[in-house]
Amino acid sequence: MSVLVILEERGGKWNRLSFEALAAGERIAGALGAPLQAAVIGAGIEKLANEAATYKIAKIFAVEHDLLARYTPDGHTAALEQLIKAQQPKVVVFPHTYQVRDFGPKLSTRFGKALISDVVDIKTAGGQVTFIRQLFQGKLNSDVRAAGEPEFVSIQAGAFRAAEPGGEAAPVEKVAAELEPSQIRTKPEEPFREAQRSVDLSAADIIVSVGRGIKEKENLPVVEQLASVLGAELAASRPICDNGWLPMERQVGSSGQTVSPKVYFAIGISGAIQHLVGMKGSKTIVAINKDENAPIFEAADYGVVGDLFEIVPAIVEEIRKAKA
Amino acid sequence: MKIIVSVKQVPARDSALRVNSAGKWLDESDITYEMNEPDAYALEEALQLKEKLGGEVVVLCAGPQRAGQTIREALAKGADRAIHVEMDEEGPLDALATARLLAKAVAPESPELILTGLQSDDLGYGQTGVILAELLGYAHATIVMEVEPQGSAVRVKRELEDGWFQNVVLPLPAVLTIQSGIKKLRYATLMGIKKAKTKEVKTLSAGQLAADTSSTTVMDRVYLPQRSKQTQILTGDAKQVAHQLVEKLKFEARVL
Ligand SMILES: Cc1cc2nc3c(=O)[nH]c(=O)nc-3n(C[C@H](O)[C@H](O)[C@H](O)COP(=O)(O)OP(=O)(O)OC[C@H]3O[C@@H](n4cnc5c(N)ncnc54)[C@H](O)[C@@H]3O)c2cc1C
């Protein structure tokens, strides 16, 4: 009847979201009065398992097999299916990483369950856990419960402060996964990065970032002018780069660059989580959006609810005056 | 190559979202709908694969009657025929229930490839494609940015976090969930729109498919998120707002 948190590693390094999921697991275990356990899956993961044992958990499972050295959905699913069948946890908690997006739903389907994905908060009352997840890219929230066990949930990046190590080292239980090479259908190659970027947004003091609210490529000069009077770098949300209006290397977010300038202008950007993770470390965030309910305002220090085509030129004008 | 593209109809991006009186889903009365954006990219990739390799593109869509409009759009862009799994539940199914329906509809088609968007813009589960693969016993890859068929296999470029990528080879049949931006989207031509009217749309009711659509998750309540951060909203006309903002940039952020 435990709560089991699946920690993620790649090439001997933790995915830091693992410890945010562990913090969520702590909350759930506390509410249910259940022991908190963790698992790490791979090959040669003893060192990581020993490190995880220093967190506030009752036990860590080190699930090993040579075939788990490089992630595959078939390998990870089979290994975890075995562990879950043996341990029968009540709740299985994942970090909502790209890897979990890839195999989490496959694993939960093996147990006839849907994964409650991308959870941003947890409510507990009377031994019942309710998960809060976003709809419409953060414009609405929903309260979701699992019907039946095991429950499978994944925790969104940044929703919980990462757990801290503390207390006595927990026991490490080695588990040898049973796997055959023929079970693994996909052949993963070595991960790679594209050629060196010519734009390094992380060095900029001010970033003017533009989203789909700009509507057309022809309107880009509106924000380019602001960038120019501020001496700022121009950046964008993903759809702008998908459309080829600005080069990919100016994309901010989970699949683009992570930036933390002194001032970040989010102009016509709704504030989807994949964008927020790339810029929420900025010192000051200014959001300009015509929708007062846009999630970006939750991240912003200063907000302007209005039409960017009126607001931005007015700001350019004011800055020119201030500089004159 | 026979390709099935699974598409969903979702509320249009700029819709004003209002929660219905039961507090369980949207008030759908004044919403307009469109094809889920990542699914539009999945369709584009399928059409380009067909143009290169020949074969057939079959559109699969589970949704109420209004989804017929999205199906017509896909046919107008060049898909050959469609399967509409008609559902009229109040509110959405969970990803497992939806995938079970889709799997039943797909099975008799035996496609080589199933493409779908990596997630829907409304519920955002990001699971339907993966579950579909598991139910059908197909291999799968998610967050796909390039597709290169290689005989009885396919090599794909997957997006990982923080600007990393990975190529993966998987055997056919396979399910790929496609990331937005994989190719440039086409528009339907007038000719295409005309032709779409004559293309086959097979309608299957959820009942006919005899899939288990019981939910394993329960959505109790849908609501506007509570704002917790103290965002300073600047008010006034454009000039006044601009003036206040410049003061903040000068004296608080100190970048001017
Ligand atoms: C795996 C994955 C990875 C992703 N990676 C990234 C990433 O790295 N970076 C990223 O940005 N996204 C990423 N995304 C996409 C992300 O989920 C969102 O779809 C995207 O960020 C939305 O971009 P947007 O805010 O510009 O567009 P929209 O969400 O369409 O928002 C446009 C905004 O403009 C406002 N607006 C419209 N007109 C005006 C006007 N005249 N004046 C003022 N405001 C106006 C609207 O109110 C709206 O809020 C990823 C998605 C997935 C699934």
Image (cartoon, coloured by chain):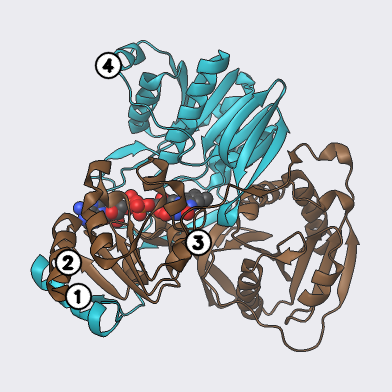
Chain colours: A brown, B cyan
Residue A288 lies left or right of residue B140; in this view the side is left
Kindly report the distance in space between the C-alpha atoms of the residues bearing marks 2 and 3: 43 Å
Callouts 2 and 1 close, C-beta under 8 Å: yes
What secondary structure is found at the residue carrying circle 1?
Answer: helix
In the displayed structure, would residue B175 be above or below residue B130?
above
Q: Quadrant of residue A84?
A: bottom right
For disc 4, the marked residue is B190
Amino acid at the residue labelled 1:
Val
User: Label 1 to label 4, Cα distance in Å?
Assistant: 49 Å
Chain identity of mark 2: A
Q: Are marks 4 and 3 on the same chain?
A: no
Q: Amino acid at mark 4?
A: Leu
Q: Earlier in the sequence, mark 1 or mark 4?
A: 4
Quadrant containing the C terminus of chain A in the rendered view: bottom left
The numbered mark, 2 or 3, whose residue comes first in the sequence reads 3
User: Badge 3 local density, few (<14 within 10 Å), some, or many (20+)?
Assistant: many
Q: Which residue is mark 2?
A: A315
Alpha-carbon span between mark 2 and mark 4: 43 Å
Residue pointed to by mark 3:
A144
Tell me the residue at 38%/34% (across/down): B64
